Image: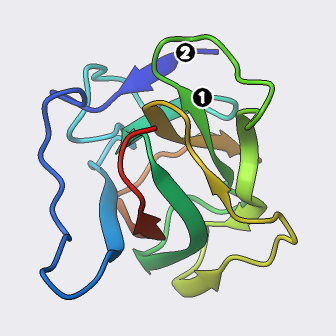
Amino acid sequence: MATITKKKVLNQKQFGGTPYGNKATLEFNLTTNAIGAFADSDVATAVQSGDKIRLGVLPAGFRLEDSKVIVSDAFTAAVTANLGFEYVDGVDSTAVPQSATYFGSALALSSAARLRNATTNAPVTLPKDAYLILTTGGAANAVVGVADIFIENVLTGAP
C-alpha cells in the first residue's frame, strides 16, 4: 500500500497558543477530489484501502488529549479509517510508542457524521515531532469527500 503525504507537511504552520493558557486545538483536513485522490497531497491517484495518509505534524511536547473528526461530505461506501500518529524521524519511542489507532479505529467515513474519540488511551506527551496519520480501510475512495480532524492538546513545550 502507498504512503501519501500532504504537500509541505513539514513546513506548515500551526497556531493556537494564547497569552492566558496552553490549551490548543490543531485542525487538519482531508479533502478528496472527484476521482477520490487526496487533493492536497503528493499523489494524484485515488486513495486505496490500506493507504496511510500523513495529514500534518503534531509537535514535540504536545500532550494529546482528545480528537474529533467531522465528515461533512461522505467518502465512498464502506470507507473506514484508523487515526493515530507516527514519529517523523521513523524511530519509535519506548516511553510513548507510536500508534496507528491512538485516536480511533474503524471510523466510518462513508457517511456525514461527527466522530468523537472513543478510545480509552491515556493522555501522552509526545517526546518528538509526530505525523498525524489516517490509515484507510474497507474500500478504495472514488468520490469527493471532506473530513476535518481536530486534535485537542496541551502545549507543554519541547522536552
Colour scheme of the picture? rainbow
Q: Amino acid at mark 2?
A: Ala
Residue lying at 53% horizontally and 77% vertically, measured from the top left: 68
Q: Residues within 10 Å of mark 1 (few under 14, many from 20)?
A: some
Residue 124 position (above or below residue 1): below
**Dot 2 and dot 1 residues touching (CB under 8 Å):** yes
Q: Position of residue 18 (x, y in %)?
A: 15, 79
Residue 153: which disc? Answer: none
In the rendered image, which quarter is residue 140 located in?
Answer: top right
SS assignment at label 2 = loop
Q: Position of residue 124 (x, y in %)?
A: 67, 55
* 24 on left or right of 54: left
* 101 on left or right of 40: right
Given residues 75 and 67, the one toward you in this image is 67
Q: Position of residue 20 (x, y in %)?
A: 19, 88
Residue 51: which disc? Answer: 1
Q: Earlier in the sequence, mark 2 or mark 1?
A: 2
* 33 on left or right of 66: left
Q: CA distance from mark 2 to mark 1?
A: 5 Å
Q: Amino acid at mark 1?
A: Asp
* 44 on left or right of 49: left
Residue 99 position (above or below residue 124): above
Residue lying at 30% horizontally and 65% vertically, measured from the top left: 27
The residue to which callout 2 is attached is: 2
